[in-house]
Image: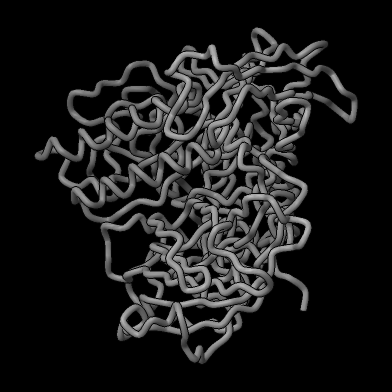
Amino acid sequence: MTTPRPEYPRPQFERAQWLNLNGEWQFDFDDANAGVAGKWYESHDFSQKITVPFAYQAPLSGIGTNDIHDIVWYRRTFSAPAGWNGKRIRLNFEAVDYRAWVWVNGIPVAFHEGGHVPFSVDVTDFLQAGQNTLVVRAEDFTWDKGQPRGKQFWERKSARIFYTRTTGIWQTVWLEPVSKLHIGRVKMTPFVDSSTLEVEYEVDEVGSDYQIDATVSFGGKTLTTETFTFDSSIPDDSWSGNQRLGKHTIAIPGDLNLWSPETPNLYDIRFKLTSGGAVLDEVQSYFGMRSVKLENGKVLLNGQPYYLKMVLDQSYNPEGILTFPDDAYIKRDIELTKAMGFNGARKHQKPEEPRALYWADKMGLIIWGEMANCYIYTETAIQRIASEFQAAVRRDYNHPCIIAWTPMNESWGVPNMKNDPRPVAHLNSMYALTKSIDPYRPVISNDGWEHAKTDLVTIHDYEGKGEVLTERYSTLEKSLAYLPINLPINLAGYPYEGQPVLLTEFGGIGYKKDAQEGWGYTTASGDEDYIERYKAVIDATYSSPIIVGYCYTQLTDVEQEINGLLTYDRQPKVPLEIIKQINDANNG
């Protein structure tokens, strides 16, 4: 049997040796929550099999049911390759929704909370010669609206704007060997104006003096190798727990090859950690030289005004639900997006998986990084979303395709802001928290309406008549006076401060092209009507002297929604070149 999702799961931080643990696992539901007391992590007669990394709700899992099962268990065996002897072996989970407990050979080794971000644990001391047993218990309470769940519905059957849930393991599980002293993380920040790359290192474990050689190349040609040395003279503030921290700046020689959707140039960079001449760790990565700035109400990419033509992408698919079936599927989605004249996508209510971000980097597609939101406001909910979004921003920081962060959307999980100062403070704290990690990208405080502190003013407007949109966005005053769902664009006390204004959800034209039933915000009766409706809302947006970018709803139909430009199985509803011609009417 071919291993599903066989590709390297962390393409911006790649080591040569690794072992994919995707494939067939033993599996069971635990509706009575009897597994812990019954010590299923030691012994249990598992009654089902599942194909990891697909959630049990996905047809590709081999189960494919939407019945509610909030607690699930997994088990499989593995053997570490003999060539890994003497190394520390790390067990990596790219994503388990929502809580995970992990046992190796009956010994508890990890607990993690957060359904969209990875976690890793050193399991070396728990392994035995030959075969080892790995058991995972996942807990994902369907009715918990204080959990960052995004578009995953809390009822059995999808409805309205909510879709099928994802429970348990839904991204790749894998092993890798590392030296005790190894590179834990690199953070790379490009500075186009000075032709430099700032690199920050986190080196795991305490060791003697050592160095990191960073070799930059482009198009297969080595450009420069620079060395950063850690030594005992570095002051105490270079330590964090058992990590050694370091930073240095690499000058990029020659003419810069800038990254943009039109020219997605990527530099390769290899990091080699050595001590006393011995190579301890080697990591392959890449980066893009590009800048994002805001100036005079415009978004600037590489110093030039750039009109954002984005499409809302829920990242759902019929067979894998929230998990892409394979790399070819990811690439095809990007190819279709670009073929219609879009230069970006708003990945909606989901921190996108690293393989998808890799292909956006490589093929040239702007991404707005977004967080899955909660639906109630509690202290637990704000703690959860703040913690998980920090992890997502740290994980995805190095991707040049990401040019903005959207921690909150449409006041989900932050209700009653007119009368309660706490959710307003939460919006501002999420903005500041994101900026504390990444000061170089714009942050949208609350996409759609009720903005507090924000770098971009974004508006959601599903008006279907082009003439109404043309009038509404003819002046700044009219644009900001609009009340989507009777809520203000900016909260009281947060006046407009010259930020770029974008229409980041609109359109949503429903059009039934196959057997799938559903709804849209407006309804087209045929191909010609659909094209006319699409052209009307795009032309209205282009006619505005205020709007500097848009995000059309949406890329594909999703379950009960039939307002995509493509059907759910990715078939164009009208010829791609017609949509592209309409989108290309403004190439500013």
Instruction: Tell me if I can see residue 555 in this picture.
Output: yes
Is 581 above or below relative to 272? Answer: below
Residue 469: image location, x then y, percent: 43, 38
Horizontal placement of 399 versus 475: left or right? right
Left or right: where does residue 207 sit relative to residue 220?
left
Where in the figure is residue 119, as x and y percent of width and height? 50, 52
- Where residue 100 appears, as percent x and y from the top left, is 42, 64
Q: Residue furthest right?
A: 221
Asked where in the image residue 39 lies, by quadrant, the reply is: bottom left
What residue lies at 30% left-to-right and 26% top-to-bottom? 453
Task: From this view, report whether residue 190 is shown above or below residue 181.
Answer: above
The residue located at (69%, 64%) in the rendering is 80
Tell me the residue at 69%/27% (across/down).
288
Please count the marks in the image.
Answer: 0
Q: Can you name the residue that lies furthest to the top here?
A: 194
Quadrant of the image containing the C terminus: top right
Foreground of the two, 521 or 318 = 318
Tell me the quadrant of the picture where the N terminus can be found.
bottom right
Residue 546 at least partly seen:
no
Residue depicted at x 38% and y 39%: 447
Nearer to the camera, 199 or 39: 39
Q: Is 258 or 126 nearer to us in this picture?
A: 126
Q: How is the image coloured?
A: one colour
Question: Closer to the camera, 507 or 29?
Answer: 29
Question: Where does the image place residue 315, in percent across and percent down from the top left?
Answer: 56, 57
